[in-house]
Amino acid sequence: MKRNLGGTILAALVVTLAFASEALAAQWNSLQDSSVVSVFLQVQGSRHITTPNDKIQVQLNSFPSGGVRWRAVNLTTLQLIGAEVNITNASAFTLVTNLSGNPTFGNFVRSNTTNGSHSGMEWY
């Protein structure tokens, strides 16, 4: 019986790429920036979701005393995506669920009580 090695390799490659693309569909991306009390500032520049993903999460490891308020904003429509979140501990917070349209978005952050810096990760 003759085996079709090329077809077997191609099928294996397709399966591998399918799993790899799903594994890379969303990932944790590093965050590090400053925030002030008086105004929301955009941090980390614009971010674009290019893969199937329906949520944005943030986990900060450090932040100014009193915490920060965090907003994800659609940079095309300038509308808030999901809810504004008040981050006062190091837990992961979901900013957006059921996200659609793969928008280009920005993170806007304001310190609650003291100016300072924050660092952590964002899932998108």
Image (cartoon, grey):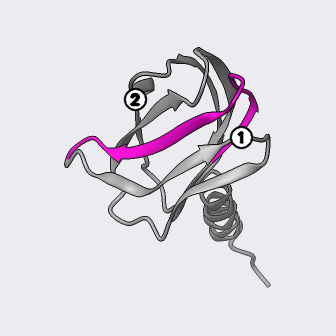
In the rendered view, tell whether residue 13 sits above or below residue 33.
Answer: below
Q: Which residue is mark 2?
A: 40
Which quarter of the figure has residue 19? bottom right
Residue at the farthest left position: 77
Q: Is residue 53 left or right of residue 78?
A: right
Identify the residue at horizontal 47%, vertical 71% (top origin). Answer: 98
In the rendered view, tell whether residue 105 sits above or below residue 18.
Answer: above
Examine the rendering and report whether any part of residue 113 can be seen: yes
Residue at the farthest front position: 113
Towards the viewer: 95 or 68: 68
Residue 108 at x, y percent in the picture: 43, 34
The disc placed on residue 88 is 1
Which quarter of the figure has residue 101? bottom left
Towards the viewer: 18 or 31: 31
Residue 110 at x, y percent in the picture: 49, 29
Kindly report the distance in space between the C-alpha atoms of the residues bearing marks 1 and 2: 16 Å
Q: Quadrant of the N terminus?
A: bottom right
**Label 1, residues with CA under 10 Å away: few <14, some 14-19, many ≥20:** some
Predominant secondary structure, magenta span:
strand
Residue at the farthest bottom position: 1
**Residue 73 is covered by the magenta coloring:** yes
Identify the residue at horizontal 37%, vertical 42% (top origin). Answer: 105
